[in-house]
Image: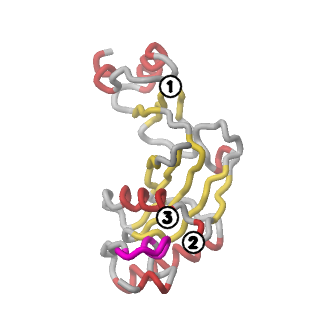
């Protein structure tokens, strides 16, 4: 399949194949050989999927970002750590992360990815490997809000946008841990910009 050769350059296996449009950890396959990749690509049809390297993650987070600032962070705890997709639909859960425990590299990576989008807000899914490297999986434009805490935080951020406009907010330049990343509707210290 010539179009497959252009899609994947024959790098190291395993790889992950996923339909372009997907939800809840479905339509995701771990592929271990070029022959299996060709078969899966044929079944899905040209242009209906993407291929990426399989990264063995040790942590995964959802960082809700509004206007270029983090509103809340939840750690994904998988139902089965061996699963590729760690989400509620696959038996996992979201655990709120306290501000002073935010994984700052993952938060910064999430904000950088978010700022490449044209979204006003979104839930950035980011995973971390054993070496501490961060990989953005996707930005959810309609992320789940199953926690009253996350609902309240999101409501505060959206209210802030309604009252003050939806312009991107720059990060605070000074040192300060989470305070340089957190949305001003959530933390008074973040309003010092």
Which of disc 2 and disc 1 is earlier in sequence? 1
Q: CA distance from mark 1 to mark 2?
A: 36 Å
Q: Residue 84 at what x, y percent from top left?
A: 58, 37
Q: Which residue is mark 2?
A: 99
* Labels 1, 3: front one: 1
Q: Which residue is mark 1?
A: 14
Identify the residue at image location x=52%, y=20%.
32
Q: Is residue 112 magenta?
A: no
The answer to whether 115 appears left or right of 149 in the picture is left
Residue 113 or 20: which is nearer the viewer?
A: 113
Which of disc 3 and disc 2 is earlier in sequence? 3
Q: Residue 146 at what x, y percent from top left?
A: 64, 64
Identify the residue at image location x=65%, y=51%.
88
The answer to whether 76 appears left or right of 40 in the picture is right
User: Dot 1 lies on which element?
Assistant: loop
Residue 42 or 71: which is nearer the viewer?
A: 71
Residue 102 or 14: which is nearer the viewer?
A: 102
Q: CA distance from mark 1 to mark 3?
A: 30 Å
Q: Are marks 2 and 3 in contact (CB under 8 Å)?
A: no
Identify the residue at image location x=47%, y=47%.
133
User: Dot 2 lies on which element?
Assistant: helix
User: Dot 3 lies on which element?
Assistant: strand
Quadrant of the rendered structure where residue 101 is? bottom right
Q: Which residues are magenta?
A: 172-181
């Amino acid at each position: 399949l010539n179009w497959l050769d252009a899609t994947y350059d024959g790098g190291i296996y395993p790889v992950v194949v996923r339909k372009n449009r997907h939800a809840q950890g479905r339509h995701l396959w771990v592929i271990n050989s070029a022959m299996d990749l060709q078969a899966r690509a044929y079944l899905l049809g040209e242009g209906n999927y993407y291929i990426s390297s399989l990264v063995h993650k040790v942590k995964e987070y959802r960082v809700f970002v509004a206007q270029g600032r983090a509103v809340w962070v939840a750690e994904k705890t998988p139902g089965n750590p061996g699963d590729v997709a760690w989400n509620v639909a696959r038996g996992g859960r979201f655990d709120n992360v306290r501000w002073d425990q935010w994984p700052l590299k993952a938060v910064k990576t999430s904000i950088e990815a978010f700022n490449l989008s044209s979204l006003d807000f979104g839930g950035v899914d980011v995973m971390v490997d054993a070496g501490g490297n961060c990989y953005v999986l996707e930005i959810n434009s309609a992320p789940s809000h199953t926690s009253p805490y996350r609902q309240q935080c999101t409501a505060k951020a959206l209210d802030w946008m309604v009252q003050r406009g939806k312009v991107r907010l720059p990060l605070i330049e000074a040192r300060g841990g989470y305070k340089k990343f957190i949305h001003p509707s959530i933390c008074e210290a973040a309003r010092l910009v």
